Image (cartoon, grey):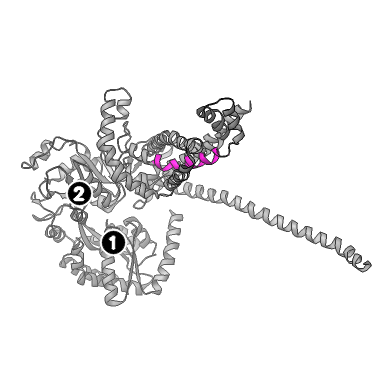
Amino acid sequence: MAVQSDVIDDAGPYDRAKALSAFKLGDVTFYWITRLSAISVLLILGGIIISLIVGAFPAMKEFGISFLWTQRWAPSADPPVLGALGPIYGTLVTSFIAMLIAIPVGLGIAIFLTELCPQWARRPIGMAIELLAGIPSIIYGMWGFFVLGPFLANTFQPFMIRIFDGVPVLGAIFAGPPSYLSLFNASLILAIMVLPFITSISVDVFKTVPPVLKEAAYGVGCTTWEVVRSVVIPYTRVGVIGGVMLALGRALGETMAVTFIIGNSFRISSSIFAPGTTISAAIASEFAESDGLHQSGLILLGLLLFVLTFFVLAAARLMLMRLDQKAGK
Amino acid sequence: MNFIKTIVAAGLVAASTTAAFAADITGAGATFPFPIYSKWADAYKKETGNGLNYQSIGSGGGIKQIQAKTVTFGASDAPLKAEQLEKDGLVQWPMVMGAIVPVVNIEGVKPGEMVFDGETLASIYLGKITKWDDAAIKKLNPNVKLPSEAITVVRRSDGSGTTFNFTNYLAKASADWKSKVGEGTAVEWPVGVGAKGNEGVSGNISQTKNSIGYVEYAYAKQNKLTYTGLVNKAGKPVQPTVEAFQAAASNADWAKAPGYYVILTDQPGEKSWPITAATFILMHKAATDKAASQEAIKFFRWAFKNGGKAAEELDYIPMPEGVVTLIEKTWAAEIKS
């Protein structure tokens, strides 16, 4: 026994230090691996910004800040005149209309799925939503081109044009002639495309509401509507807004489907039934055959989209912070 | 655009090394001749065992890549000016031709029934003529029943050689178009909706009533679109036929054009179709890989000699013999082996 205890006494302190340093090494390695992964995101992002700025520099020098509010896009004029107002307008308008449609519908589906839907129907509806997210955007574009477009141009748009004819403001927004390549058609397709983002994230966060909270609310006699409005939504606000922002990011940057059905016109028209263009559609259309200042202008458009998306997301964060502060009081 | 160039170049170096291993010729550029180049390549490989790897990345890309020496030949729908060729040490020649036709979708109007002239076409694309029963259109088509409906103008949204040739024709035919819009692969369109590619424009025209557009002749034919005739430089109305396209090419003055810089729109001759277009091949006079360069010339020589029928089957127009003889001379004189 004595021999054995000797061994333990001898080995003890030595092994302990070795084991500890091994742990420490493992920990430090793990720390650095994760840290490098995190830093790599910043490096990639920085690399993209720098190359965009380098590529866009000739156009920035040529057109300056007026690039932002010039509506003319004449790459073959002598000298070329390039302005981003048309694509910026189209990007904002299509995203706005898409969100206007997708947020209520998406939340509606999510609430129905988590609160009201009979158990047996949840999976099929849930899977249908996920499937919507899986459809490639070019398929949406083709569907918009061959199916939705003709329907809108022949049925829906003439109807809206007739209804609002002569009404101030609205009359100009819904002005003819109907066309199946239009801002409105693109907005509708975008709305369908971003719907799954809003819905599936909302469903996930709605599921995190502790049942006891809802049961308590039902217990004091709340209706389903009141439970959703006063318990579920406030509890999951951050998550829902996160989903909406993700959807908005997709809507701002979606390229292929939009290029197919927006009509690619750089002119701004008051009517949403007129053709327009978005930043990403303009780049996708013209980049392959562009050179010199024209290409630089397209890269500058890309930089603008980058900045635009950044500001939209930053504004959303800020809004979220304000909401949290209010809730804190 | 250095960073893009580097990426493209890196990709191409990788592609071309594997290609060289298989004794293949590499080319890149215009999308318009892609079907015929691949058909020729296929037949050529069967005959000689030598392959051709052609990437249809667009005319602009083709020019950039031949300048960067990443391919054996570049292809472009718009020719380079002689000074530009000289600067980069390039040789250029027309390889095959196509034509662009106006297409319309008006109820009751059949292919070839209507006719336009350049001035009227320009006015429609400028938005000055907005209805089908406009006096100018009626005057050209006294026997066609035209509706009093708004014209939906359709054009390409992507930068393209088709647009370059179409706007080039309008600029030659109308001073107003020249000063207001000009010519280019992508221009500042005053009116109209833009659709992607020839397919997009054909699809759009066939679905939209009272529309007008322009497409490659092959697309109009294959999609059974209602093409129209055009009044040519000699003042004669012509229909889009292979004879009319070849007439335009034959009447062009190739011999006097340095670097074959001839744009085939609005050519003289009573039978010439006004919007005919050649697509061009670009090669270095002194290529770094001389073997590949020689191999490519062999292929092009073979294509001129044996490829005419295949071209016609795909609705392309072979270069007239006189022009081919000129090109052979150019090869002998300018390309160093």
Q: Dot 1, crowdedness within 10 Å: few (<14), some or many (≥20)?
A: some
Q: Is residue A213 left or right of residue B131?
A: right
Front residue of B181/A107: it is: A107
Is residue A63 or residue B227 the one in the foreground? B227
Classify B151 as above or below B112: above
Within the image, what quadrant is residue B293 found in?
bottom left
| Quadrant of the snapshot with the N terminus of chain A | bottom right
User: Which amino acid is tagged 1?
Assistant: Phe
Q: Can you give x and y, in whole percent of width and height, for residue B82 in the image?
A: 28, 59
Q: Which residue does the image show at 23% across and 61% down from the upper left? A: B260
Q: Chain of mark 1?
A: B
| Disc 2 residue type (three-letter) | Tyr
Element class at badge 2: helix
Q: Which residue is mark 2?
A: B169
* Numbered range of the magenta stretch: A190-208
Marks 1 and 2 belong to one chain: yes
Name the residue rendered at 34%, 58% in the picture: B57
Residue B269 vertical position relative to residue B140 in the rendered view, above or below: below
In the displayed image of the protein, which residue is found farthest to the bottom? B48
Task: Decide if residue B194 is on the left or right side of residue A228.
Answer: left
The dot on residue B34 is: 1
